[in-house]
Every structure is written in structure tokens, then in C-alpha cells.
Amino acid sequence: MTLEDLGYTDALEQFRSGHALNGFGIGRVVAEHRERYVVRTIDGDLEAEVIGRLRTEARDRLDFPAVGDWVALKVHEPGHAMIYRVFPRSSVITRKAIGEHGGTQVIATNIDHAFLVQAMDRDFNINRLERYLAICHTSGVRPIIVLTKTDLFEAGQVDGLKDQVRARIANVPILALSNVTKDGCEAVRGIMEKGKTYCLLGSSGAGKSSLLNNLLGTATLRTGAISTSTGKGRHITSHRELFVLGTGGILIDNPGMREVGVTDVEGGLEVTFDRIAELAQDCKFTDCTHTTEIGCAVLDAVQHGELDEASYTNYQKMKSEAAHFRTTLAERRRKDKEFGKMVKRYKKDTGNL
């Protein structure tokens, strides 16, 4: 396997040469387990961890390696290496960290396309699809919607669900498949390009791991059935992992996400809800919030049935979440800065500088 097989590009090589990294090994993070990493190199997989300086200089979780990252490393003992540098990312998909004030969770990095996987039975939720789309558009990742479990529906029902999605989401490819009969799986494999990186996003039980197994042609990952008591998927994929398909495409599997909290996705909302952005140009006020203003073209479109009300409501909810995230993040950084100043004063007063 070459670095190019893992997605290495000329831009990454230029960064390596321009930052005196020629004396280091190069690899891509293919798995992460509690800040210990598996890095794939041309000589095989290595267990790795970050050096102390990289750890102490990190401002937040975004500064640590993540699955999909390219890193500069050195082997310190057989099978084990230390990570000295994380290469610049072409894209990074994040979500709001669950239970963390102003925190961000990295889902994957250096992604070209994201498969938004959703089962057409109990998991079907267009609001959630719009959340994934906002995250993708903010990250500069091109989304592809994948609807699974077609074997549970008649052809007309499948077409009807696809039409429901198209009524609210335009200009995004939609694929439908069955992981049981494998009908439609070949279409997914056919659009994946050699050297390009794709990731799977969706809830537990949506069929992500089953799809990956079908694309790989082997039962690499354990899969589970939907819980009959809750109707929710069982957690099978417990960590993120990168795979290289036989056709050359690169695919990152992710644990199921029952909560898709957005971070600062303002730009992504403009792309995801392009119809609202288009209508907003005709609002009376340039700073219109599209909530109560007189002369709001967006509200007028909702009232006259020209804009889907559910989509409008979802837009406003995500916009509010993004604003709240920015506020809490700013507050967190302010407190961190004050704490840093307090530590410096203490060291100065006690002579421990």
C-alpha cells in the first residue's frame, strides 16, 4: 500500500517539505482509542500517541489527532510511534459534544463526501437529515443521502419517501438500498472514487456497518438488530475506523449518533436552507431574523404555503442552537483565559515562574 492509496496528496507533500518534516515518517490515523491511535503507514499499522509538547500546547480537542488525520511520526520501538505533528486538514466534521459546556467533538477529518445513512422505517426523519446537511456544508464536505431497508417497502413506497426528501432537500443525490438483498449497494460502490475519503453518518441501526460490510465484501464489523422495545438501534460500532475498499475508495465508519447537536453552522445553514436564504433577499430589513418582523419574505412564504413550515421551524431551531453554542464557547474561553492569568499571578507571587 502506498500513501496515495490512503489519500495522500501533492498539497500534503508540499506541507511536509515546507515544514522540515522530511525526516519523519508519514501516516494516516485509521482508529482512535482514548487518545491512543492506530496509524497506517507504508510499512504497516503502528500504535501511536502524541508527544508531550503537542499535548500541552493543545488549546482544545480540535488540536488532537482524529480519525482521517495525516500525521508526522517517529518509531520509538517496534510497532509503536510518537506523533509529532498533525497536518493541516482539508475538512473537519464536528458536532456539539454531549454534556460538555461549549465543547466540540470531532467526528472525522479530511473527508471529501459524507454518506448520510437513514433507514426508511422508524429512523426516517428529514429534520435530522437537514442537521447532517448543515454540518456537512459548514465543513465543506459534499453530502450524499442513503436510504436503507428498501426490502421492507414496495417500490412505490420507496419512491414516495424519496419524493418527501426531495420536497425539502434539493441538489443532494439520494440513493436507496437494501443491505439484506444488497440491491442498490453496487450504486454506492460505483460512485466512490479511488483515493477519495468518504464517511458514514447516521443513527445506530440505520445500516451503516451492514453497508460497510457489503462494500468490503466481508463481515468485518458486527451488526445488530433494532431493539423491539425501543425501536432504536443497538450500539455496535464503538469507535471510528478508516477502511480502504478493494476499489480504492476510503471509508470511515462512525458510531451511531442519536443526538446531532450543531456547533457554529451559520454558513452551512445558508447552503442547507438555500430557499430561505433566497427569500431573505426580499425581506424589508437586512437584519431580519424571520421571526416577527413586518415585511419578512420568509414568514410570508410560510403563511402562503410556498415554504415548508417544518423546514422553516427546523432552520430556526438550528440557528438558535448555533447562536447559543457561540455564546457558551466565548464564555468558556473567557473563563479559561481568566484561569490562566490567575495561575500566572500565583506563580509570580510564590516565585515559581
Image (spheres, rainbow, N blue to C red):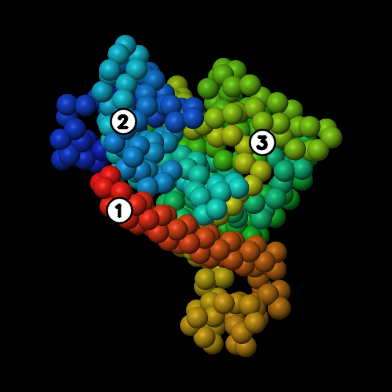
Q: Residue at x 68, y 75 (%)?
A: 302
Q: Residue at x 28, y 52 (%)?
A: 348
The image position of residue 70, as x and y in percent, is: 33, 34
The image position of residue 66, as x and y in percent, is: 42, 36
Is tag 1's residue or tag 2's residue first in the polypeptide sequence?
Answer: 2
Q: Residue at x 59, y 81 (%)?
A: 297
Q: Nearer the viewer, residue 9 or 62?
A: 62
Q: Is residue 201 left or right of residue 23?
A: right
Secondary structure category for the residue under label 2: loop
Viewer can see residue 247? no
The image position of residue 352, as x and y in percent, is: 28, 45
Occupied quadrant, residue 205: top right
How much space separates mark 1 and mark 3, taking CA atoms?
53 Å
Q: Nearer the viewer, residue 299 or 293?
A: 293
Is tag 1's residue or tag 3's residue first in the polypeptide sequence?
Answer: 3
Relative to 340, say whether 31 is above or below. above
Secondary structure category for the residue under label 1: helix
Occupied quadrant, residue 20: top left
Q: Mark 1 highlights which residue?
A: 349
The 10 Å Cα crowd at callout 2, few under 14, some 14 to 19, many 20 or more, is: some
Q: Mark 2 highlights which residue?
A: 51
The image position of residue 224, as x and y in percent, is: 70, 26
The 10 Å Cα crowd at callout 3, few under 14, some 14 to 19, many 20 or more, is: many
Q: Nearer the viewer, residue 106 or 243?
A: 106
